Image (cartoon, helix red, strand yellow):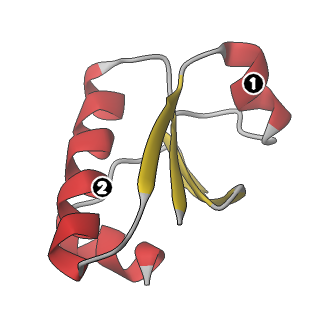
Amino acid sequence: MKIQILGTGCPKCQKLAADTEKAAKELGLNYELVKITDINEIMSFGVMMTPALAVDGKVKFSGKAPGVEELKGYLK
């Protein structure tokens, strides 16, 4: 599974990355976490608000940083 964090590195983006990694570890997933910070690459996903989460190239949400439990639902 490829988990992509789309964001410029702001505090919300950093929190999303940390919480997503925690959620993936708690679920016991085999994953690769990639942080995408280039604005043009972020826009190529169709994302206009960050932070955003993509799993295997598909955007799950944008413009928020949900907690660990909610993130588990996106990663299952």
| Number of numbered tags placed on the structure image | 2
Tell me if 58 is positioned left or right of 53 in this view. Answer: right
Q: Position of residue 26 (x, y in %)?
A: 15, 74
Q: Position of residue 34 (x, y in %)?
A: 49, 38
Question: How far apart in space, not on screen, are marks 1 and 2 (Cα)?
Answer: 20 Å
SS type, badge 1? helix
User: Is 23 above or below relative to 39?
Assistant: below
Q: Is the C terminus in the top left, top right, bottom left or bottom right quadrant?
A: bottom left
Quadrant for residue 67, please give it.
Answer: bottom left
> Mark 2: which amino acid?
Thr
Q: Which residue is mark 2?
A: 20
Tell me if 61 is positioned left or right of 42 in this view. Answer: left
Q: Residue at x 64, y 15 (%)?
A: 38
| Residue lying farthest to the front in this orientation | 30
Q: Residue at x 69, y 29 (%)?
A: 42
Residue contact between numbered discs 1 and 2, judged by CB atoms under 8 Å: no
Choose the circle earlier in sequence order: 1 or 2.
Answer: 2
Quadrant for residue 23, please give it.
Answer: bottom left
Q: Position of residue 65 (x, y in %)?
A: 34, 48
57 or 46: nearer the viewer: 57
User: Is 59 above or below relative to 14?
Assistant: below
Question: Could you say which disc has been placed on residue 60 in the image?
Answer: none
Q: Which residue is mark 1?
A: 41
SS type, badge 2? helix
Q: Position of residue 16 (x, y in %)?
A: 31, 44
> Mark 1: which amino acid?
Glu
Q: Residue at x 20, y 67 (%)?
A: 25
Q: Residue at x 68, y 16 (%)?
A: 39
For label 1, count other residues whose C-alpha is less than 10 Å away and answer few (under 14), some (14-19) or many (20+).
Answer: few
